[in-house]
Amino acid sequence: MTLAERTDVRPGVAPPAPRPRRRTAVARPWLLLTPALLVMGGLLLYPLVRVLVLSLQDFGLRELVSGRTKWVGLDNYGELLGSADLWATVLPNTVVFAVVAVVLTVVLGTLVALLLARLTPLVRGLVTTAIMVAWAMPAVTGTYVWVFVFAPVDGIAVQALDALGLVDAATANPFAGRISFYAVAALNVVHHGFPFVALTVLAGLLTIPRELTEAAIMDGASAWRRFWSLTFPMLRPVFAVVTVLSTIWDFKVFTQIYLMPGGDGVNRNVLTLGTWSYVESFAQNRYGLGAAIAVLLTAMLLVVTMAYLRLLFREEEL
């Protein structure tokens, strides 16, 4: 309370009503946020609520044409959780692929960042521009490039492996097997995602004082010792952010899986939660079950996001 307001208060006299200017000051931030909140509600909240409602319905092509809905409660979730495909194929594919892709992306991105930090500014700019091309490449284009490289019979990679005696190019099909399919998918995802990690870690590396590194070298510390005992502790928040963001992105990878041969549901051994939801919804016209799968994937991503926010708040407390 200001000095002018204190002088206006008298014993037995009601305090003055809040001034309109104060109420306007309180409402101004919300007025400024209203357009953004409306856009977020329309683009994010409404689809989430619509998918959740759809997952509680037996919604197929007939309901789509007639506009009538049939509520089934949690039957779609019961069918989803009772499906052998979920536990034997889809969930392992989703989780294992995401973990492998995240590890490879962070490790490769860190190694590239360490290399960039040693280069001269001119060469560093050229190399950074080159890897930015991989980042800027659309996922559809990048996927078709990798499909061309690993094409059966006459693909460049298949021919190279045949020359090394590892496969028979006449019969080898990398997209037919579950492990080989995801090996190609991991190469595709890592190739597209490592530039973000490299540039983010490089930005952190450039903030470390050169004197600390030079002192460690004079003490005889090896390169691994300098990274593990000096660089990694100082860049722990950076590694936490890139790891959690990569986990979120790799859990919901869709384009790279769906566009590869067999990834559109023809080969059910390579389905993930994202592609399974799409196939059940738009190929099988079982929109209710597809929505339930999407809700399960969203719940898993929310868990990862909560872990990400907890890490951020913990770093702020430190």
Image (spheres, rainbow, N blue to C red):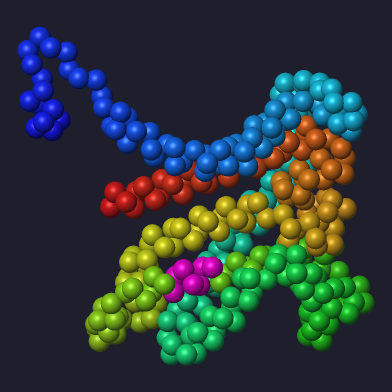
**Magenta residues, as a range?**
196-202
Q: Quadrant of residue 73?
A: top right
Q: Position of residue 88 (x, y in %)?
A: 74, 45
67 or 150: nearer the eye? Answer: 67
Residue 29 appears at what percent x and percent y? 39, 40
Query: Left or right: 31 with respect to 234?
Result: right
Q: Position of residue 253 (x, y in %)?
A: 68, 55
Q: Is residue 314 left or right of residue 169?
A: left
Q: Is residue 90 above or below residue 291?
A: below
- Residue placed at 29% from the left, 49% from the top? 317
Which residue is rendered at x = 49% and y = 72% of the image? 199
- Residue 254 in picture, x, y percent from top left: 72, 54
- 180 versus 168 height, above or below: above
Side of 95 where 124 appears, left or right: left
**Residue drawn at (58%, 75%), measured in percent from left and top?**
132
Residue 25 in sight in this render: yes
- In the rendered structure, does residue 44 fall within the stretch colored magenta? no
